[in-house]
Image (cartoon, rainbow, N blue to C red):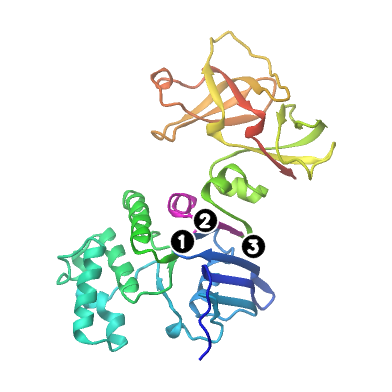
Amino acid sequence: MSDPVTTSFDLECRNVSKNFAAFTAVDDVSFQIPQGSFFSILGPSGCGKTTLLRMLAGFQHPDSGDILIKGRSVLDTPPNKRPVNMVFQHLALFPNMTVAENVAYGLRRRKAPRHEIESAVTDMLARVGLPDSGGKRIEQLSGGQKQRIAIARCLVLKPDVLLLDEPLGALDLKLREQMKVELKHLQEKFGTTFVYITHDQSEALVMSDHIAVMNKGRFEQVGTPQELYYQPDTAFVASFVGDSNCWRGTLISRDSEGAVIRTASGLQFHVEGALANLQQGQEAQVYLRPEAVKIELTSPTSHGDASLGCGGENRFGGVVDAVLFDGARSQVQVSLDQSSESISVALPQTPMFHNIGKGQRVQLSWAAGQCSCFPA
């Protein structure tokens, strides 16, 4: 018998690729997931994330590369022999079985002793917060309870890795928000590694320890939610993760502290940070988060001149074009003076802004270091 493999990673992918005729669905993807992590793969429809998940589960075979679980390759291991389990988007619970029978299904397939099955099911229902639901039919459960039973049915088999294929996609908004928190708590309680597939950035940001942003079959960036949000490596990550203002302009000057970007309509502002790939005269894309902009109300007759400077704030006057009220996520659209450009700004949750309306003059400012800048 070979010696056991010691590794701190529950799951590894090494240069995994998958092609369908002339189409490359997954292109040379590599990553490692530490034990007990909540790892999300985030990307738009068609980016390859579901194909990658199916290869992890064993439903499809990669054309090249290797997949390892607990340090051992599983390429030649069929799906039913891999130490993984999967929660599907539509849950696939059995309506003709009770809740307890659904949770026990996998154990019965393994021919576990009856007393072990009963004990495991009782313990699992208690751990997911449904200790008295074993005798209920599936249709008697709420949407959130069904989610927990689908997870319990998988976790009772004690997989090394649990794969989740957009399991919150069919829920209404209120329940989806609630289940994001519940899923994270369940993962922490069980300590099982979760690999979660989603196109919803909010789900990934709220629940994950690490996120891989996927685009056109490749990983654009892997990092913590905070790293992806505040320090995007690519223009795609900056635009896909969170809300951003985006401008296209030309780098007209630079020094050791930053650079000045000018758009085609004349908007000119200072940026700092990772500008190593940009040279004077080169076109650039600049991203700025709405909440990074400070907003002040000004009098109807005031007209603030645009100003900028190294290490200081960019300042612009403008007029509110629209108020997009959404409670704590409300924004205003502002047309900037001396430019045809507009900007989205997060609306502060203070009384002075409760009655802000179209036509209100405002003063905007943001620090040069708040911008993310990439070659166009």
Q: Looking at the image, is mark 3 or mark 2 earlier in the sequence?
A: 2
The Cα atoms of the two marked residues, 2 and 1, are separated by 8 Å
According to the picture, the residue beneath numbered tag 1 turns out to be 37
How busy is the neighbourhood of tag 2: few (under 14 within 10 Å), some, or many (20 plus)?
many
- Residue 192 position by quadrant: bottom left
Q: Is residue 309 above or below residue 256?
A: above
Rendered view: 350 above or below 27: above
Q: Which residues are magenta?
A: 197-214
Q: Nearer the viewer, residue 5 or 203?
A: 5
User: Which labelled disc corresponds to residue 210?
Assistant: 2
Counting from the top left corner in percent of width and height, residue 216 is at 64, 62
Please give the name of the residue rendered at 44% of the width and 32% of the height, measured from the top-left corner: 330
Circles 3, 1 touching at the beta carbon (< 8 Å): no
Q: Which residue is mark 3?
A: 216
Count neighbours of disc 3 (C-alpha within 10 A) and say few if under 14, some if 14 to 19, many if 20 or more: some
- Determine which of the numbered discs, if any, sits on residue 84 in the image: none
**Residue 183, x across and y down, in percent:** 36, 58
Residue 116 position (above or below residue 244)? below
Could you say whether the residue bearing mark 2 is in a helix, strand or loop? strand
Q: Amino acid at mark 3?
A: Lys
- Say left or right for 131 vs 219: left
Q: Dot 1: what SS?
A: loop
Q: For the residues labelled 3 and 2, say whether their Cβ atoms are less than 8 Å apart.
A: no
On whether residue 71 falls in the magenta region, the answer is: no
Task: Check disc 1 and give the amino acid type.
Answer: Ser
Mark toward the start of the polypeptide (2 vs 1): 1
Residue 210 is a magenta residue: yes
